[in-house]
Amino acid sequence: MKSVIVTGAGGGMGQATVSLLAEQGWHVLAIDRNADRVSCFANNAQVSTLVVDLSDQALVSLVTTAIATLPPLQGLVNMAGVSVGAPICDLTQAAWQAAFATNVDAPMLLTQLAANVMPQGSSIVNIGSPVGIVGANKPSYAASKAALHGLTMSCARNLGPLGIRVNLLLPGPTITCMTNDWPQSRRDSIAQGTFLKRLCTPEEVANTISFLLSPQASYFTGSVLDMTAGSLWGH
């Protein structure tokens, strides 16, 4: 038995990832700030939940306590992310700091925690965004995702000698609770920007994360996986 931490576990991609990994025999520590969103795992013996905001100063101590009674930690999925802020002329320092607290600081702290207890052969998957490469209307979000890229590459370099792999996944436009609220015309327009002319599904993201955590990806580290079906180039 082995354990994996998944942040942002209550979102569309998070729920799909937690469910798949639990089915595959992982014990999952599902972390989300919204208790209602992780309540769907209440009857799953393979899933433990932790309700906490990733910007909370108690994050590391709470996670340390949570994993102490679980099987050995061999995986970490830094999926949670927030898009806060405004265009540069109206961007506040508070919004900038909030974006980095969740999108960069938390993955750094959890990676540091995990790396100190993970055995050789473990894997860390960070969920980035194409905007970390091409920019966005919100510099705070794009810059934090670019920083996550740099963090991933540096941690892959640092942890490689320990046999711990670290990779960055860039999902494309994905069907989630957020996109379900969009008008059909907007969903169709975004889908047309991909080579496959459709949105990605949460299950497809979960399958890729599962692969990156698995021994089948044993020589993947420091990799940036473009899962945008071509939309990165026209983002």
Image (cartoon, grey):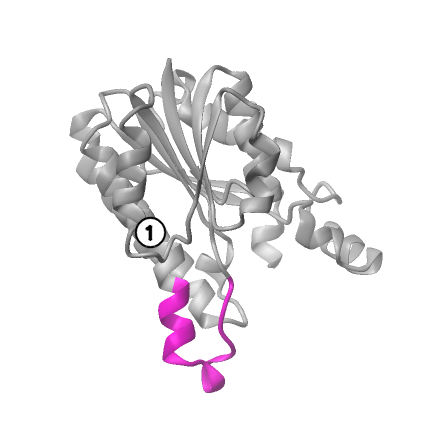
Residue in the image at 56% along x and 24% along y? 20
Residue occupying image coordinates x 43% and y 73%: 95
Please indicate whether residue 190 sits to the left or right of residue 78 in the image.
right
Classify mark 1: residues with Cα within 10 Å, few (<14), some (14-19) or many (20+). Answer: many
Would you identify the image quadrant in which residue 219 lies? top left
Specify whether 162 is left or right of 32. left
The part of the image, by quadrant, that contains residue 17 is top right
- Residue 146, can we see it? no
Q: Is residue 221 above or below residue 98?
A: above
- Picture quadrant where residue 182 is located: bottom right
- Quadrant that contains the N terminus: top left
Left or right of 190, for residue 47: left
Q: Quadrant of the C terminus?
A: bottom right
Residue 9: percent from left, percent from top: 51, 40
Q: Indicate whether 91 appears above or below 12.
A: below
Please give the name of the residue rendered at 27% of the width and 28% of the height, measured from the top-left corner.
68
Residue denoted by label 1: 106
Percent coordinates x, y for residue 80 in the rendering: 47, 48
Relative to 43, is 31 on the left or the right? Answer: left
Residue 139 belongs to the span the image colors magenta: no
Residue 122 visible at all: yes
Residue 42 or residue 187, whichever sits in front: 42
Horizontal and vertical percent for residue 76?
Answer: 37, 34
Most extreme residue toward the bottom is 89
Bounds of the magenta segment: 83-99
The kind of secondary structure element at disc 1 is helix
Percent from the top left, x then y, of residue 78? 41, 42
Number of disc labels: 1
Q: Residue at x 57, y 31 (%)?
A: 41
Q: Nearer the viewer, residue 79 or 65?
A: 65
Task: Report the amino acid beneath label 1.
Answer: Ala
